[in-house]
Amino acid sequence: MTPAAPPPLLSVEHVGVEFPVRSSVVGRSSGTVRAVDDVSFTVADGETVGIVGESGCGKTTLSRCIVRLLKPQRGVITFHGRDITKLSDRALRPIRRQMQMVFQNPYASLNPHRRVGVIIAGALPKRIGSGREADDRVAGLLEKVGLKPEMADRFPAEFSGGQRQRIGIARALAAEPKLIVLDEPVSALDVSVQAQVVNLLGELQEELGLAYVFVAHDLSVVRHVSDRIAVMYLGRFVEMAPADLLYADPRHWYTRGLLDAVPTPTLKARRSSSRGILKGEAGTVLDAPSGCAFRNRCPGATEICTTTVPPLVEEPDGRAVACHHPLGASAS
């Protein structure tokens, strides 16, 4: 008998997040908008799930929900077998040590008035205490992320953007987490520095067995670190697949358009046949069209796309696609 698969480290089931829409005149609520709409996925121990989409699609809102910086109005979030959806802040404290977050802006995410060593030491488990043991742990964490131990005495303003993001990663590691949610961790960095930070994250994952949720707007950034990738458009997942499969054979028109924008020589033929799919702006969830939210930009849209939201349908090859007319459907 084949042993049962272990339960996922993180499970997100049908999560929805709504925000009130305020009137610009009197400031009263005139309704709500769904920033995240019926999103489901899992993350296994040691796995990286990439979440990709244009600005305003709900990626950051979803990432903040995962670590419960935001509370979803619908759905269930389970971490390490425990439902954390409605836990109080007090009950969440020990759990949050196991699920850390690295933020997009390395300039705003570090307290400018505290030395780096104090920032990192503040995230250490209580059992480590203070004094020499804490100093040694901070020094080891700085070395682990490619910085010198003596840098613990400096302030964040004395570091470059890439170095500050390494400090943010060290602070996350100090809590000894099982899962790290990375919200656009390299988008504010130069391209050469981006590669260094992405490589560092891969090395740390291999060494420590970490699981990642890696949020980005660029498919090329997550390609080499993600086991699976979810493509998000205006609050919903439109495609989710193993990374290699998604790159080799995208089924959703939006995924194809994102790949079309990746400046990779191997995608030359694909770009010539699919150029222009992403003409126009994505818009926001405030002005999303009826039916399929992508239909106004999709060359394959038909009448059904204007009236019916396509469900996310699982396929035999391990992917899921939300499209009435998926690419390659006639050939499959």
Image (cartoon, helix red, strand yellow):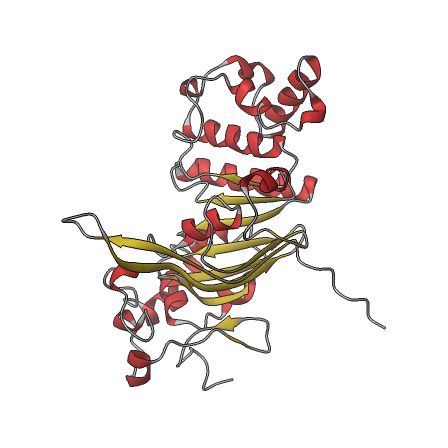
The residue furthest bottom is: 330
- Residue 291 higher or lower than 69, as above or below: below
Give how far across and how far down residue 144 sits, in percent: 63, 29
Give how far across and how far down residue 183 sits, in percent: 46, 44
From the viewer's perspective, is 13 left or right of 251? right
Give how far across and how far down residue 271 sits, in percent: 35, 65
From the viewer's perspective, is 320 left or right of 23? right
Residue at horizontal 66 percent and vertical 16 percent from the top: 130
- Residue 106 higher or lower than 39, as above or below: above
Res 252 → quadrant: bottom left
From the viewer's perspective, is 133 left or right of 113? right
Q: Nearer the viewer, residue 291 or 23?
A: 23
Residue 221 in view, yes or no: no
Give how far across and how far down residue 109 sits, in percent: 43, 31
Figure label count: 0
Res 298 → quadrant: bottom left
Q: Nearer the viewer, residue 140 or 266?
A: 140
Residue 211 in view, yes or no: yes
Residue at horizontal 41 percent and vertical 52 percent from the top: 218
- Residue 108 higher or lower than 33, as above or below: above
